[in-house]
Image: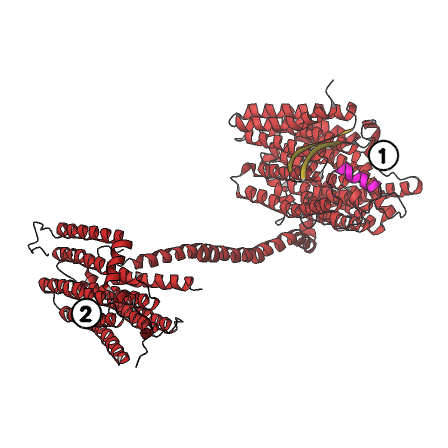
């Protein structure tokens, strides 16, 4: 069994973050990319809570509170943008959005 | 005149420059006016030079022209007896040539350029004569080379003329490399190139034992005075107009080398003098041999000039410091300058006479198409005869005295050289009398010669002046005390030596002249008339000897041609390859290509895809991480 | 026992995260995200941050992922085509793998003190403490975040306004 220490929590958080990042790079569906972005955010909240718990402060928890709020707002706006983008380009493949090429 | 001598000297220097500038700026198309301006400048120069020589006293003047850090470029005048003598010679001969050119170049289309060139030449030559330090002399040295190029190139539509001008300039340049090296070494070694200071250093006993410096400086004289092995340019330089040949390539410019040697006499060491002596002797002999086979009147006179220059250089080399039997170092200077003076007179006379002949025969230069001109061009004939007599060493003419001085010096210091020089004297008599006989006596050999006529006063007056000088120029008393500093150095034989030298020179004259008269005389000419084959009697009579002499004459040219074609051209091709391929190709275009590549690479990053941008973001983060974690 | 739970939930979370990345179908990916959020909430509970676990499930899993699902199904996107050879794939995979390896190794080398959690008391367990902190010390951020939400709402309304050409309905 894995030991229940700060290190393992951090390991899990790191893994989640890395997987999220991999998703951002490898996936081409914009919505899935966005989902992976959220995954990265969640990973960082896990790390914060773990630190807050093991250092016996409140700051980490409170910060996570705010992160959650901001993430929600961000998702709303981001999805609105994606919808608008879809309306214009009729596609969600990220590699089609290359009008800035060269 | 209340003008101070230094001021007058500068005026003398700058008058011809002013004339040249005026012609170049304003009178480009006004040939007649240009000739008058130039003549006026030459006259002014002559008057100034005469005044300075006779009443101006001797002085030296020094100023700084500009500074480069610690090095100051000096400008100054050293007007001693040597300079006075040379300046007078240059002025007199220059004036005669200017007058002659009025008539000779009357129908030329580019008179202004010609007279401008003459003025520039006078300026440069006076600059060489008056300068008191080697840097200034070198600057004027190069200017003289340039004027020579300009004037040889006068009829530049003729390819032979432009080739000859280039050849003269380049060969001179080769000598000038050595000259410049010598000047630099001198400056480095002695801290000064001022002639006065060098003289003072030498008098105070500072060690003057370098062999390299005088020999390197001699290289300049080898180039300018056309000694072996750089003599190849002088015969070709005859492509220029005849007055130019008279002024530059006989009397003054080529004598500048001798003059320079005399100026730097304090730097000489015995080993250097030996080298100089043998170079001069070899040149004298070689040129005399080549002169015997020439059929072009100007080329014959050119080789004669070469030979006499060899005499002067040999004379300088003979004045040794070794303290052996005979006169000391200064005698060489004296003998050389004496011969330079008399040679200037009679050689200019001979060239101007030949110019008169050429013009009279409607630009014919081959002596075997002249003949019988004695009757048709009496004045020229008389003047030319005086010149021939002087150069052959007819007793009591100027040339006789100067040549005797050299022979005496040789006899006292170096017997083998004496033998060679005596033989060369005989050869000199031979080819000069041959020239004289073929051109003036006998029957005319062509239509042009049959209708020859004398030129106007502008052609005959200079001949008269120079003839008089050639007759009496050897008597030192003529000059009064003006040049005593130099003329007192001329060695004079006494007693038994005197008789021996006298006899030697008379014998040489008789042998040479006699052979020429026999070979080219009336009977030989009559026998030769109507025979097919070469017109030259020597060529007919001794074809093997003639052929050998022809090959001898062209040997140097052949060697140089080979060197230029095979060695130098190949080296130039290698350098060209390096320049085009490596420098322009690799380095310059390569650098441009690299910049282009970087640009292309940067451009490839802008793909427009988000995923790629995130990748680059990651890369940047990792980099920052790595940097921060160090 | 607690250690087993921790292990189970940790593995569960990571596995579902992998599922998000790997799944072709966007809906499947969203469901996997949901499950991994569940796992993270469980881990929060283990860390005695009960409010946060609750909030996570409510806000994130309840609202955010639902929103995602709405959009996915609204936009009716076809599955991603097969991963044809495009230039960046290998490079990206390599980069991601490197990152993974990097973070993992770094975190494994961590030198933080291995305290036993059971011995310490968790401050975040007390709701009272939480509230007092929020409304005294962090009041300003709370107000600002409220303001931010307002702005976000306005932004969304503006962004999803209908233009003449498109005919899709507004999203909430």
What is the quadrant of residue B597 in the picture? bottom left
Q: Which of A34 and C54 is in front in this view?
A: C54
- Asked if residue B214 lies left or right of residue C43, the reply is right
Outermost residue, top direction?
Answer: B1
Q: On the rendered structure, is B492 left or right of B533?
A: right
Residue B284 falls inside the magenta stretch: no
Task: Report the Cα–Cα distance between label 1 and label 2.
Answer: 121 Å
Residue sitting farthest toward the front = C128
The answer to whether marks 1 and 2 sit on the same chain is no
Q: Is residue B531 left or right of residue B83?
A: left
Q: Residue at 18% of width from left, 50% of height from top?
A: C151
- Read off the chain for label 2: C
Residue with the mark numbered 2: C33
Extent of the magenta region: B191-208
Quarter of the image holding residue C99?
bottom left
Q: Mark 1 points at which residue?
A: B488
């Amino acid at each position: 069994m894995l030991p229940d220490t700060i290190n393992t929590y951090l390991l899990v958080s790191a893994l989640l973050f890395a997987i999220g990042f991999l998703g951002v790079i490898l996936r081409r569906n914009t919505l899935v990319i966005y989902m992976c972005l959220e995954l990265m955010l969640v990973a960082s909240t896990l790390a914060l809570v773990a630190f807050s718990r093991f250092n016996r402060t409140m700051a980490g928890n409170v910060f996570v509170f705010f992160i959650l709020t901001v993430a929600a707002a961000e998702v709303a706006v981001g999805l609105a943008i994606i919808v608008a983008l879809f309306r214009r380009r009729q596609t969600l493949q990220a590699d089609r959005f290359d009008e800035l090429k060269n | 005149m209340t003008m101070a001598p230094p001021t007058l000297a500068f005026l003398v220097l700058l008058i011809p420059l002013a004339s040249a500038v005026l012609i170049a700026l304003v009178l480009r198309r006004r040939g007649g006016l240009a000739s008058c301006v130039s003549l006026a400048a030459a006259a002014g120069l002559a008057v100034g030079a005469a005044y300075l020589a006779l009443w101006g006293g001797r002085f030296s003047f020094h100023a700084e022209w500009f500074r480069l850090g610690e090095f100051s470029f000096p400008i100054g005048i050293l007007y001693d007896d040597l300079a006075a003598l040379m300046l007078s010679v240059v002025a007199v001969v220059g004036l005669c040539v200017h007058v002659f050119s009025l008539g000779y170049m009357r129908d030329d289309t580019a008179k202004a350029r010609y007279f401008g060139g003459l003025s520039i030449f006078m300026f440069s030559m006076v600059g060489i004569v008056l300068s008191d330090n080697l840097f200034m002399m070198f600057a004027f040295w190069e200017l003289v080379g340039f004027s020579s190029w300009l004037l040889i190139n006068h009829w530049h539509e003729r390819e032979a003329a432009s080739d000859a001008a280039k050849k003269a300039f380049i060969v001179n340049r080769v000598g000038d490399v050595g000259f410049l090296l010598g000047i630099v070494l001198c400056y480095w070694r002695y801290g000064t190139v001022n002639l006065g200071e060098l003289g003072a250093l030498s008098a105070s006993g500072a060690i003057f034992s370098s062999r390299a410096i005088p020999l390197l400086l001699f290289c300049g004289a080898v180039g300018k005075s056309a000694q072996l092995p750089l003599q190849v340019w002088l015969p070709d330089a005859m492509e220029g107009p005849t007055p130019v040949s008279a002024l530059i390539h006989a009397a003054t410019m080529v004598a500048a080398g001798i003059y320079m040697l005399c100026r730097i006499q304090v730097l000489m060491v015995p080993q250097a003098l030996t080298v100089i002596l043998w170079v001069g002797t070899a040149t004298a002999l070689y040129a005399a041999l080549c002169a015997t086979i020439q059929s072009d009147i100007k080329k014959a006179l050119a080789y004669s000039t070469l030979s006499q220059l060899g005499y002067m250089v040999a004379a300088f080399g003979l004045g040794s410091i070794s303290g052996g039997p005979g006169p000391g170092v200064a005698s060489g200077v004296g003998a050389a300058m004496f011969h330079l003076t008399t040679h200037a007179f009679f050689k200019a006379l001979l060239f101007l006479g030949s110019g008169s002949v050429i013009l009279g025969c409607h630009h014919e230069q081959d002596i075997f198409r002249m003949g019988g001109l004695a009757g048709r061009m009496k004045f020229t004939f008389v003047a030319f005869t005086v010149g021939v007599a002087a150069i052959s060493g007819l007793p009591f003419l100027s040339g006789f005295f100067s040549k005797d001085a050299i022979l005496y010096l040789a006899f006292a210091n170096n017997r083998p050289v004496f033998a060679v020089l005596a033989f060369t004297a005989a050869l000199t008599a031979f080819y000069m009398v041959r020239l004289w006989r073929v051109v003036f006596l006998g029957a005319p050999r062509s239509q042009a010669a049959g209708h020859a006529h004398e030129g106007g006063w502008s052609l005959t007056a200079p001949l008269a002046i120079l003839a008089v000088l050639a007759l009496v120029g050897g008597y030192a008393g003529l000059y009064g005390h003006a040049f005593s500093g130099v003329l007192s150095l001329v060695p004079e034989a006494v007693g038994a030596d005197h008789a021996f030298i006298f006899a030697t020179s008379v014998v040489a004259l008789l042998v040479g002249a006699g052979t020429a008269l026999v070979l080219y005389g009336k009977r030989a000419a009559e026998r030769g008339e109507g025979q097919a084959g070469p017109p030259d009697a020597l060529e007919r009579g001794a074809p093997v000897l003639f052929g050998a002499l022809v090959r001898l004459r062209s040997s140097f040219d052949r060697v140089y041609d080979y060197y230029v074609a095979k060695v130098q051209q190949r080296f130039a091709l290698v350098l060209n390859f390096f320049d085009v391929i490596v420098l322009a190709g690799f380095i310059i275009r390569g650098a441009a290509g690299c910049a282009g590549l970087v640009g292309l690479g940067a451009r490839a990053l802008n793909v427009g895809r988000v995923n790629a941008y995130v990748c680059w973001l990651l890369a940047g983060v990792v980099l920052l991480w790595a940097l921060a974690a160090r | 026992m607690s250690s087993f739970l921790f292990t189970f939930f940790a593995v569960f979370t990571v596995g579902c995260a992998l599922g998000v990345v790997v799944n072709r179908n966007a809906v499947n990916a969203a469901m996997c995200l949901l499950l991994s959020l569940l796992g993270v909430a469980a881990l929060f509970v283990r860390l005695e941050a009960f409010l946060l676990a609750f909030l996570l499930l409510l806000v994130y899993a309840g609202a955010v992922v639902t929103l995602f699902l709405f959009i996915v199904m609204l936009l009716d996107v076809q599955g991603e085509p097969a991963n044809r050879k495009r230039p960046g794939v290998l490079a990206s995979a390599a980069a991601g793998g490197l990152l993974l390896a990097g973070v993992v190794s770094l975190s494994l080398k961590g030198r933080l003190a291995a305290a036993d959690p059971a011995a310490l008391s968790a401050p975040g367990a007390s709701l009272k403490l939480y509230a007092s902190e929020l409304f005294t010390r962090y009041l300003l951020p709370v107000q600002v975040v409220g303001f931010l939400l307002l702005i976000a709402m306005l932004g969304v309304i503006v962004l999803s306004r209908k233009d003449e050409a498109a005919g899709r309905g507004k999203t909430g």
